[in-house]
Amino acid sequence: MTIAAVIGLGTMGPGIAATLARGGMKIRVYDTSAEALEKAPGMVAMAFGVLDRLGMPDKGSADDISYHTDLAEAVDGVGLVVETVPEKLEIKAAVFAELDKIVSADCVLASNTSGIPITKLQEGNSNPGRVIGMHWSNPPMIIPMIEVIAGGQTDQGTVDWMCDTIKGLSLLPVVVKKDVAGFVENRILYAIMRESVDLVEQGVIDAEGLDTCVQWGIGYKLAIIGPMALLDMAGLDIYQAVGSYLNAELCNRPDVSPYITDRTKAGNLGQKTGSGIFSYTPDDIQRLRGERAAAFVAVRKALEGKS
């Protein structure tokens, strides 16, 4: 049985820990924050509830997760470390440097970074061949696709082991063949976000209308048919004809729009502060979390052909 450690209990750590434990691993979790460690068992319990509703193979329980305030204790003898600390290169690099000193020689070091090139996290590592990207999507206990990213010095054996491990969890590994910033999922997502923000900012549509258009238009289609298959279904000649004039009109700004930066400067960060593009009460946030979790479960079951 693989013993793994999850380092960081913010947005995704508890869900990742629960998914790994449910898949049959013994998990140790660590965070520098006492508050995060205190909240984590409740978040893990919620994640297990979602995994129950999904009907995921039941190979482990929340009892297979232990909580640690000492990093060396958390990673002692583990075969896999999944790092999910804040998305800043200097923080992640410091964590990897510390891990390199205390894990066993054959321990795989995986980062859940959303887009920092894995090659940067390998710098200075005594065994860079074991360092790899394992990019989960949020919420991690629901979305089954995990990007596997090799850095410039990652061994092929590490890639193969990671893919086999993910398959063993009844999840879907996708190998990203080049270590580009943002990998694949977030490059697609941020292209959509940039165009969406621009259309709202330019007054082409309001925020509610934009969300409806995407959810029930392209979002509905893309849940069933991927972009490359959609090209074939629609016809490459159609894409060429429309793209020949539309591509030049799409937003290509290299910075982040004031529509976003003005709000962040004012402290309006979204649900976490009660206001962002939309406004939220605590009851709204609780309701949305429940509704969205239920919808995610239903959609995944439908896509998998489950009743």
Image (cartoon, rainbow, N blue to C red):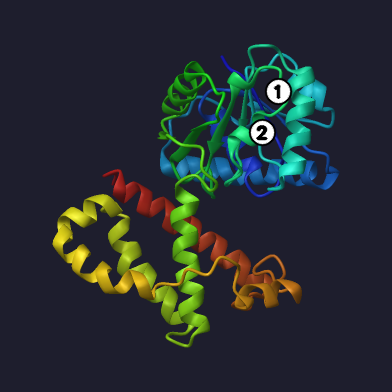
Question: Left or right of 187: which side holds 273?
Answer: right
17 and 71: which one is in front? 71
Please indicate, yes or no, whether residue 69 appears anywhere in the rendered image. Answer: yes
Residue receiving disc 1: 125
Residue, disc 2: 121
Q: Secondary structure at mark 2?
A: helix
Q: Residues within 10 Å of mark 1 (few under 14, many from 20)?
A: some
Q: Residue furthest top?
A: 105
Question: In which image quadrant can residue 250 be found?
Answer: bottom left
Residue under the point 83% across and 43% down: 33
Which mark, residue 304? Answer: none
Mark 2 nearby-residue class (10 Å; few <14, some 14–19, many ≥20): many
Tags 1 and 2 touching, CB below 8 Å: yes
Under circle 1, the secondary element is: loop
Establish if 26 lies above or below 112: above
**Residue at 53% in and 70% down:** 253
Q: Is residue 144 left or right of residue 269?
A: left
Residue 274 visible in this rendered orientation of the protein: no
The x and y percentages for residue 5 are 68, 27
Is residue 234 shown left or right of residue 220?
A: left
Q: Position of residue 92 (x, y in %)?
A: 72, 39
* 80 relative to 7, above or below: above
- Horizontal side, residue 97 vs residue 181: left or right: right
